[in-house]
């Protein structure tokens, strides 16, 4: 290449760099940004390093429908932009300020709105941008996440549930947040602290449909519960059998298909991960193989996106309230309403043994174990099991009402109460007046309510109240129906039983690996 060509090329590079600086994109060096357009875009705006992840989630034609269809957020904003567009680059820092409020576990208000973007300059995204009639950049659209899945949008055409966000008055973070506040009737601020101004925070006092969003919290609680066990090395010879039984219960009746499938994988390979052979481990320790050092997070028991790092239905008004304990109670209730009559006694002993051996809160564990021990005989049908856990939950609440009143440690927005309230289930009491504490319980109605609440209602809903498209596969049938993951299903069907057959299936897998299986632990009463 001649000296003249080199000089001309250098001049072009300098001119392009000067143009981008004048556009306010914050680039310090054009030559550092040669490469794919996506890499270039991630370096623009505020001079941030490309190694710092954006808060807004960048989607493409391959991930758009699946991501939004499965998002736990109540609403979504999608920004359609072009990486070559100076206006888009200038707007990105403003969009990011709002995205940081709502996106991710470290966000101030996680789980309410998911902020996403699509680069229409990428050829692969052309048809996706055409679906939503993108004619200028940036274009912002608003809707419940599921409304975007496999859908189209045309300006001025009603019925899609998708709305255009007008940013022509000014492309600033404050104006975008003002639009969102007007839409939700909220008062979010760019300088909010954690959980501040959450006027859209879910309240589960009187709206039975709000339990639908708890499926995400059940997944979160499941992963956190098992991760505590794995990371704290709580698997010992005497605790293996209670854990195995609980894993079998999850595989058979967990409301999330992802959790059933992931737990089945751990269960089938259990002896390869944690050996119980006394010749290898002695009498007091379990040999942990290389894979057994992992936690539930590493096994992705409920999918690669879990844990999300935040709670939705179980979110408290303070960072130290509700959360895991709420998610664990919902998990236990959702399991009991799904078992059959002939599985009730085994489910009762499984839950009691599991809490007794693995729950680290000593007072909680002791109180729960005491309520298990006070039962004369295990429930012999689903109704008795469901009502036993309901009474147990209310006994815990009654004790905590007194403790939280004395210590002022309760959540002011979610005070403990005898449950369900008359607003949530008016028919659950005979002659109920003046709130929760009057009238006697109508246990037939309570049982029916619990079956609906933790069974059919425990599924993601969109804003319109319908089940989110594409997620029905993640929801197990309610009441006594048996739901198991693919793989375990064949073994269960051949054995002609549900929960108990999982034990047979598991034992068969372990025998193939020539490992010694421990005998099931006896029930504690």
Image (cartoon, rainbow, N blue to C red):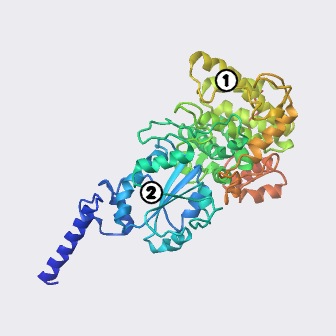
Distance of mark 2 from mark 1, alpha carbons? 57 Å
The count of marks equals 2
The disc label shown at residue 17, or none:
none
Locate the N terminus and report the quarter of the image it occupies.
Answer: bottom left
Q: Please state, as top left, top right, bottom left or bottom right, where the C terminus lies in the image.
A: top right
Q: Nearer the viewer, mark 2 or mark 1?
A: 2
What residue appears at the point 65 percent right and 32 percent down from the top-left corner?
357
Residue 343, position as x, y percentages in the image:
82, 42
Relative to 252, is 480 on the left or the right? right
Please give the residue where the numbered disc 2 appears in the rendered image. Answer: 167
Residue 223 spot, x, y in % from top left: 59, 44
Position above or below: 429 against 212: above
Q: Secondary structure at mark 1?
A: helix
Disc 2 crowd rating (10 Å Cα; few below 14, some 14-19, many 20+) is some
Mark 1 neighbour class, 10 Å CA radius: few under 14, some 14 to 19, many 20 or more? some
Viewer-proximal residue among 180 and 401: 180
Which residue is more in the foreground, 151 or 4? 151
Look at the numbered disc 2 and give the secondary structure of its residue.
Answer: loop
Q: Residue furthest top?
A: 406
Q: Residue furthest bottom?
A: 2
Q: Is residue 518 visible?
A: no
Q: Name the N-terminal-most of marks 2 and 1.
A: 2
Measuring from the top left, give residue 28's x and y in whole percent: 24, 59
Image quarter of residue 381: top right
Residue 340: x and y in percent read 84, 45
Which residue is disc 1 drawn over? 366
Closest to the observer, 19 or 291 = 19
Q: Quadrant of residue 81?
A: bottom left
For the point 34% across and 59% down, which residue is it?
A: 90
In the displayed structure, 409 sits above or below 503; it is: above
């Amino acid at each position: 290449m001649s000296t003249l060509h080199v000089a001309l090329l250098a001049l072009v590079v300098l001119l392009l760099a000067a143009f981008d600086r004048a556009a306010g994109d914050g680039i310090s060096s054009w030559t550092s940004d040669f490469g794919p357009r996506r890499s270039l875009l991630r370096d623009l705006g505020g001079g941030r390093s490309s190694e710092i992840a954006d808060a807004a989630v960048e989607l493409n034609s391959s991930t758009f429908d699946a991501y939004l269809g499965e998002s736990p957020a109540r609403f979504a904003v999608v920004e359609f932009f072009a990486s070559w567009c100076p206006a888009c680059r200038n707007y990105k820092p403003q969009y990011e300020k709002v995205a940081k409020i709502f996106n991710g576990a470290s966000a101030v208000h996680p789980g309410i709105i998911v902020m996403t973007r699509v680069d229409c300059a990428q050829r692969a995204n052309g048809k996706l941008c055409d679906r939503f009639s993108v004619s200028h950049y940036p274009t912002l659209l608003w809707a419940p996440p599921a409304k975007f899945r496999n859908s189209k949008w045309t300006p001025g055409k009603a019925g899609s549930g998708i709305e255009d966000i007008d940013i022509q008055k000014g492309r600033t973070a404050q104006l975008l947040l003002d639009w969102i506040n007007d839409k939700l009737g909220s008062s979010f601020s760019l300088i909010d602290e954690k959980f501040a101004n959450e006027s859209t925070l879910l309240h589960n006092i009187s709206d039975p449909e709000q339990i639908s969003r708890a499926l995400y919290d059940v997944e979160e609680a499941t992963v956190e519960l098992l991760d505590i066990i794995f990371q704290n090395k709580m698997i010992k010879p005497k605790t293996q059998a209670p854990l195995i039984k609980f894993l079998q219960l999850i595989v058979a009746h967990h409301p999330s298909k992802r959790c059933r499938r992931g737990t089945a994988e751990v269960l089938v390979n259990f002896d390869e991960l944690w050996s119980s052979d006394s010749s290898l481990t002695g009498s007091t320790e379990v040999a942990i193989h290389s894979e057994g050092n992992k936690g539930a997070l590493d096994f992705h028991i409920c999918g690669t996106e879990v844990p999300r790092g935040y709670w939705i239905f179980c979110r408290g008004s303070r960072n130290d309230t509700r959360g895991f304990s709420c998610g664990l109670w919902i998990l236990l209730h959702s399991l009991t309403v799904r078992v059959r009559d002939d599985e009730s006694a085994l489910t009762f002993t499984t839950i009691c043994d599991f809490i007794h051996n693995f729950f680290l809160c000593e007072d909680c564990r002791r109180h729960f174990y005491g309520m298990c021990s006070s039962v004369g005989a295990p429930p012999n049908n689903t109704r008795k099991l469901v009502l036993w856990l309901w009474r147990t939950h209310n006994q815990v609440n009654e004790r905590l009402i007194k403790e939280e009143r004395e210590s002022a440690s309760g959540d002011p927005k979610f005070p403990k109460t005898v449950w369900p309230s008359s607003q949530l289930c008016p028919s659950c009491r005979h002659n109920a007046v003046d709130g929760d504490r009057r009238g006697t319980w109508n246990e037939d109605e309570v049982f029916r309510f619990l079956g609906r609440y933790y069974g059919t209602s425990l599924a993601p809903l969109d804003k319109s109240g319908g089940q989110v498209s594409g997620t029905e596969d993640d929801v197990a049938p309610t009441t006594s129906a048996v739901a198991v993951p693919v793989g375990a299903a064949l073994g269960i069907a051949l054995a002609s039983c549900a929960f108990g057959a999982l034990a047979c299936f598991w034992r068969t897998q372990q025998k193939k690996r020539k490992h010694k299986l421990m005998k099931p632990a006896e029930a504690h009463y």
